[in-house]
Amino acid sequence: MAVPKRKTSKARRDKRRAQTHKAKKVTLAKCPQCHEPKLPHRVCKSCGHYKNKEVVAVD
C-alpha cells in the first residue's frame, strides 16, 4: 500500500481545495431598449423594461 513520504503542507492542501470555490464570471446581456448591460432574465435597472415591455417605472 502506498504511503506519502512527506506531510502535505497547509499551503499545498489549500491551493488544491481552492479550485472548487472559484468565483464565476458574471454573465451580462444588453438591454434591447437602452443597450445598457444587465443580468439576463431580470428587469433592466436603468429603463425598467423586461421582454420589450415596461414593467417598472424608473425616474
Image (tube, rainbow, N blue to C red):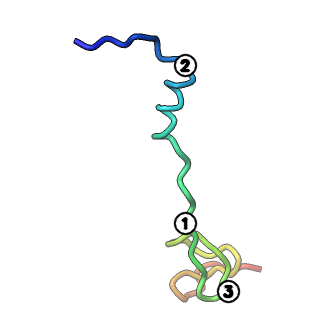
Work out whether residue 1 or residue 51 is closer to the camera in this orientation and state it: 1
Q: Residues within 10 Å of mark 2 (few under 14, many from 20)?
A: few
Q: Position of residue 58 (x, y in %)?
A: 72, 79
Amino acid tagged 2: Lys
Which element is circle 1 on?
A: loop
Q: CA distance from mark 2 to mark 3?
A: 50 Å
Residue at left offset 47%, top offset 17%: 8
The residue that disc 1 covers is: 27
Q: Position of residue 36 (x, y in %)?
A: 67, 79
Q: Residues within 10 Å of mark 3 (few under 14, many from 20)?
A: few
The residue that disc 2 covers is: 10
Q: Residue furthest right?
A: 59
Q: Residue furthest front?
A: 5
Work out whether residue 31 or residue 17 is closer to the camera in this orientation and state it: 17
Residue at left offset 67%, top offset 86%: 34
Amino acid tagged 3: Cys
Amino acid tagged 1: Thr
- Compared across the picture, whether 17 is left or right of 3 comes to right
Q: Which numbered disc, 1 or 3, marks the residue closer to the eye?
A: 1
Number of the label disc, if any, that sits on residue 34 = 3
Q: Which numbered disc, 2 or 3, marks the residue closer to the eye?
A: 2
Q: Position of residue 32 (x, y in %)?
A: 59, 87
Which element is circle 3 on?
A: loop
Q: Which numbered disc, 1 or 2, marks the residue closer to the eye?
A: 2
